[in-house]
């Protein structure tokens, strides 16, 4: 008889940055209008989206 380990994630699951954490889930970030404006300007200067800038800030 073989037992399956319920804590082992499936090997075919998408992983967050290759660390086998499982699928990436959306995260809502709430910020005020001033922060949004600053992020928008920075994103335009870097030719990226605000979402990309937030992702890069979280990774740092």
Image: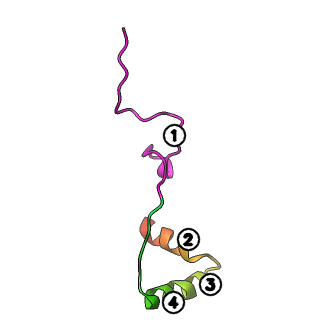
User: Which residue, given by chain and number where applicable, does mark 1 sit on?
Assistant: 13
First of labels 2, 1 by sequence position: 1
Q: Is residue 7 magenta?
A: yes
**In which quadrant of the rendered image does the C terminus lie?**
bottom left
Rendered view: 4 above or below 51: above
In the displayed structure image, the side of residue 32 where residue 11 appears, left or right? right
Numbered label attached to residue 34: none
Dots 2, 3 in contact, CB < 8 A: no
Q: Nearer the viewer, mark 2 or mark 4?
A: 4
Q: Where is mark 4, residue-wise?
A: 37
Callout 3 secondary element: helix
Mark 4 surroundings: few (<14), some (14-19) or many (≥20) residues within 10 A: few
**How far apart are the alpha carbons under marks 2 and 4?**
15 Å
Quickly name the residue at label 3: 44
Alpha carbon separation for disc pair 2 and 3: 11 Å
Give how far apart the Cα atoms at labels 2 and 1 are. Answer: 23 Å
Q: Tell me the crowding category of disc 3: few under 14, some 14 to 19, or many 20 or more residues within 10 angstroms, Cα based.
A: few
Give the mark nearest the N terminus, 4 or 3.
4
**Crowd rating for badge 2 (residues with CA inside 10 Å; few <14, some 14–19, many 20+):** some
Q: Earlier in the sequence, mark 2 or mark 4?
A: 4
How packed is label 1: few (under 14 Cα within 10 Å), some, or many (20 or more)? few
Identify the image quadrant of the N terminus: top left
Figure check: 8 above or below 44: above
The answer to whether the residues at label 2 and label 4 have Cβ atoms under 8 Å apart is: no
User: For the magenta stretch, what is the residue range?
Assistant: 1-25
Q: Name the residue carrying label 2.
A: 52
The residue positioned farthest toward the right in the image shown? 47
Residue 42, given in percent of the width and then of the height, sits at 55, 85
Label 4 to label 1, Cα distance in Å? 36 Å
């Amino acid at each position: 008889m073989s037992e399956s380990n319920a804590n082992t994630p499936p090997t075919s699951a998408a992983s967050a940055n290759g660390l086998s954490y499982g699928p990436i889930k959306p995260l809502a970030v709430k910020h005020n209008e001033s922060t949004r404006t600053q992020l928008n300007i920075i994103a335009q200067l870097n030719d990226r989206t605000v979402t990309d800038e937030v992702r890069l800030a979280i990774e740092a």
